[in-house]
Amino acid sequence: MEDRLSLYGRPRRLAEEALLDDVSAPYFATWYCTRRCNLSCAHCFVDVTPDIGRRDPIDTATARAMIDGLVDNDVYQLGFAGGEPFLRPDFYELAAYARERGLTIQVATNGLFLDDAAVERLLDVGFRCIQVSLDGATAESHDALRGAGRFDAALEGVRASVRGGLPVVLAIAVHRGNLDEVEAMVELAERESAIILKVQPVFTPFAWRGGDGALGPEEVRAVIRRARARSDSVELSFPRWAQIVEDGSSDATCATALRNVSILEDGRLSLCDFGPEHAFGDVTKGDFFDAWRQLVTQHHHRQRCGCSAYLDSARQEVAA
Ligand SMILES: C[S@@+](CC[C@H](N)C(=O)[O-])C[C@H]1O[C@@H](n2cnc3c(N)ncnc32)[C@H](O)[C@@H]1O
């Protein structure tokens, strides 16, 4: 009887079913395919490990079954994230399999493994663009987060991609240390022929020169405004939570973006990159849709995700 207690005045099961009717499966799945990383960026929200020899919890066979599950449930796109996806020895094999099964594929990388041969291989496998992180318009700001020499190396990777015919999406994490470079970053993206500049303001606290490098809501709004004012040919994209901050009055939660789902390294699903504690289900145990249903119904009960507290404070600031 308890199970049928009213939620928003309706029996709980019916409310869940209605929710799942609205969205039968997410369009996009981002898989945090490894926690191994050759960098250890100061701001990173992923708990990465430098242990390059470590085994990933989801092995190749399980990953193939997971891909089958995505296809069976009409997921449209699989994105490889991490960690550094290129450190998975089966990265190309799994990407090729996902493509063979009809998924579109994406990858987010630090660019350090990109050369002419890698670009050719990526194109052969079926990638139609690649996302490279460039966290600043200068070596000084990028390398402050990612280590000496990384800016030039990532830029070489970007140029190899463009030269080889693989369009580049540039991703910049904006924080207090590179806030002044927003316009220069837009110009750099246009100069390097990027097709999209993903502007990713950092709101998760991290130590930056003795203070916190994360941006407050007003800074997030300014970043969006300034990037838009400067952009000419490059398309800009902003995360859903940042758009909610910009539109201060909205009461939306970003986790209502049920069309994107993240698959964590251990197979749990999460609606939010920033809150692994809000993850549910397990794609390695049975059907993808069952795992996703668990995530959605659990989220529906809690109505919180990793950026909820930040969004609450941004709204309070607007209301005050
Ligand atoms: C987690 S990395 C993983 C893929 C790859 N290793 C890379 O460097 O792009 C994916 C993207 O998330 C961004 N990112 C990491 N931590 C972030 C944070 N706290 N806020 C905003 N973006 C962040 C990175 O800068 C990068 O562009």
Image (cartoon, helix red, strand yellow):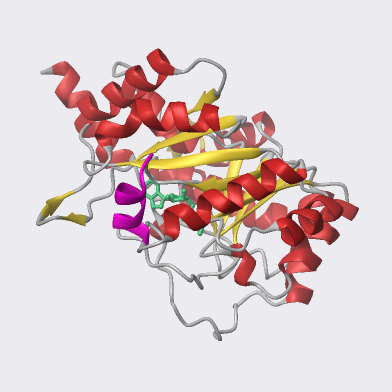
Q: Looking at the image, can residue 43 be seen?
A: no
Q: Could you tell me which quadrant the C terminus lies in?
A: top left
Tell me residue 182's x, y (percent).
34, 30
Tell me residue 69's x, y (percent).
78, 57
Left or right of residue 315, residue 55 in this image: right
Magenta span has 112?
Answer: no
Front-most of residues 128 and 80: 128
Left or right of residue 20, residue 277 in this image: left
Determine the main secondary structure of the stretch shown in magenta: helix
Front-most of residues 267 and 188: 188
Q: Which residues are magenta?
A: 137-146
Residue at 87% over, 47% down = 102
Magenta span has 143?
Answer: yes
Q: Looking at the image, can residue 104 be seen?
A: yes
Q: Residue furthest right?
A: 100
Residue at 56% over, 63% down = 268
Left or right of residue 55, residue 256 in this image: left
Tell me residue 89's x, y (percent).
70, 76
Q: On screen, 98 above or below 54? A: above
Q: On screen, 5 above or below 274? A: above
Q: Tell me how many marks there are.
A: 0
Tell me residue 122's x, y (percent).
77, 55
Residue at 49% over, 50% down = 298
Residue at 76% over, 41% down = 165
Front-most of residues 27 and 256: 27
Q: On screen, 301 above or below 184? A: below
- The part of the image, by quadrant, that contains residue 304 is top left
